[in-house]
Image (spheres, rainbow, N blue to C red):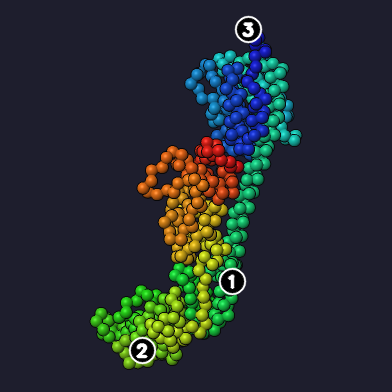
Amino acid sequence: MNSPPEMTPLFADPKRLLLDLAQQRELPELLDLLVSRIGDSPAVALVRLWLVRPGAGCESCLMRSECPDQTRCLHLVASNGRSLAEPGRDLSRVDGRFRRFPIGVRKVGRIAMTGEAIEAPDMAQLPPWIAEPEWVRAEGIIGFAGQPLSHHGMVLGVLGVFSRVRIGAACLDWLRMIADHAAVAIAHTHAWEEVQRLRTKLEEENEYLQQEVAAEQGFGEMLGASPALRNVSQQIDLVAPTDSTVLILGESGAGKELVARELHRRSDRADRPLIKVNCAAVPRELFESEFFGHVQGAFTGALRDRTGRFELADGGTLFLDEVGEVPLDLQSKLLRVLQEGEIERVGEERTRKVDVRVIAATNRDLREESRRGRFREDLYYRLSVFPIELPPLRDRREDITVLAEHFLRQAAQRFGVDAPRLTKAAAQQLRRYDWPGNVRELQHVVERGVILSRGGPLRIDLQGRADTPAAPPAPDGSPEQTEAQVLTEAQLRDLERANLRRALAAAGGKVSGPGGAAELLGVKPTTLNSRLKALRLAGR
């Protein structure tokens, strides 16, 4: 038996709508939920929601002449319904004639101004405030309910419902309750947006402060704050103001050139040039010319006079990188410059005085080289007046994250892309690796990660590198995977289960969000949850 019109429900399950509204944190989703759930009912012709916002688009507003001050008005933000007169009409659009209502103007504006509902549950006689009587008749509209969205005495917006049935008293009560709950939910989304905005601002400020701290703790261009690097900085402070020769010892890629720059920067010669020579890159027959210069015609190809590196560094600092590569028979001439401060250009008998502070660097054990007769012992002692040993990156893992962030920003700027985010999981992966190539290898890995990330979080690819930590062993009973093996379905599931456990462990049990297991695995959180459920694994 059909219910009489006044008893026809306006829409289904209003209790569920109230519960669902309370779960929403994002305003667009909340608005869509509200108008979709009400507007999907056959008894509803049109449902619309306006929110009070600062005046905007006043130049094109059809009600501009009626607006008292153009500072605030009602903005149509959500709409839904179904047209009987024009079945193809899209009633979800928010850019039509009634997209704005001045506060206090017409029925919707009066609701916002007074905070009082306008209810016409049975419009047998059309009220005078109906703007389009023809539309009301064509759509068979019988009732209207306009409810203010009020929170703590402040009207946030207006909910308007046009129905094709008489709106009973119970339905009006539900609409009032829904409007009140929607106002609370909207206020909460505004608060959540503000929290997110402040959180983002704090993260940006924190990143800036971390960069400032890194700059303060990074000893100039040497980024980091580890005890090992602090010890190096203290040695630099001791010897930089002097003219003593310094020998920087360290593995390849550890940053020996940066130490040389810091020595020069903190010295009294900082306003003079720092000249660098990579001894390993100089052909043997050109060593003398490179160091001391030559005159025109000194040898085949000497078409003009050339100033050597020692003369270029006069009054400043000369950095001899990989000094262990200097040929043995030329080391005596280098020793003479260090002892006497004099040079002679190739092909010239004139002696020239130079005032140069020498800093040398090597990844060799020059003491052992001199013992074996491959490096002059007197030159070794002359160079190592003040040795500084630069620790490898694996001995100062505390600095890896700061260095990675620095290289990440550098690479993103150079490639013209937004800097990807370095997640905690990626930072942990970087810290676990032993970095045989030291800082240089870290820089290249981060650059590769920036290229691979494509707008997502930084992707770290250490596969195939010599000292990549081995993956945790597979669970008991799992087969060892080799290229020659054909795995059963059960074995594949065991491998997948082990991999998911490792991802969850690396993410601290978290499935979604930044640093979550889904991000590490490169899958959607919903996909990962399905896999975890299928394999009977737990995450959070």
| Amino acid at pointer 3 | Met
Q: Secondary structure at mark 3?
A: loop
Position above or below: 78 against 218: above
Label 1 to label 3: alpha-carbon separation: 87 Å
Tell me residue 265's x, y (percent): 52, 76
Instruction: From the image, state whether disc 2 or disc 3 is nearer to you.
Output: 3
Position above or below: 54 against 10: below
Query: In the rendered view of the protein, which quadrant contains the C terminus?
Result: top right
In this image, 506 relative to 52: left or right? left
* Residue in the picture at 44% in, 38% down: 489
Instruction: From the image, state whether disc 1 or disc 3 is nearer to you.
Output: 1
| Amino acid at pointer 2 | Glu
User: Disc number at residue 1?
Assistant: 3
User: Disc number at residue 135?
Assistant: none
Determine which residue is flagged by label 2: 344
Tell me residue 378's x, y (percent): 44, 88
Give residue 15's quadrant in the image: top right
Question: How would you rate the neighbour count of disc 2 (Cα within 10 Å): few for under 14, some for 14-19, many for 20 or more?
Answer: many
| Amino acid at pointer 1 | Arg
Question: How would you rate the neighbour count of disc 1 (Cα within 10 Å): few for under 14, some for 14-19, many for 20 or more?
Answer: some
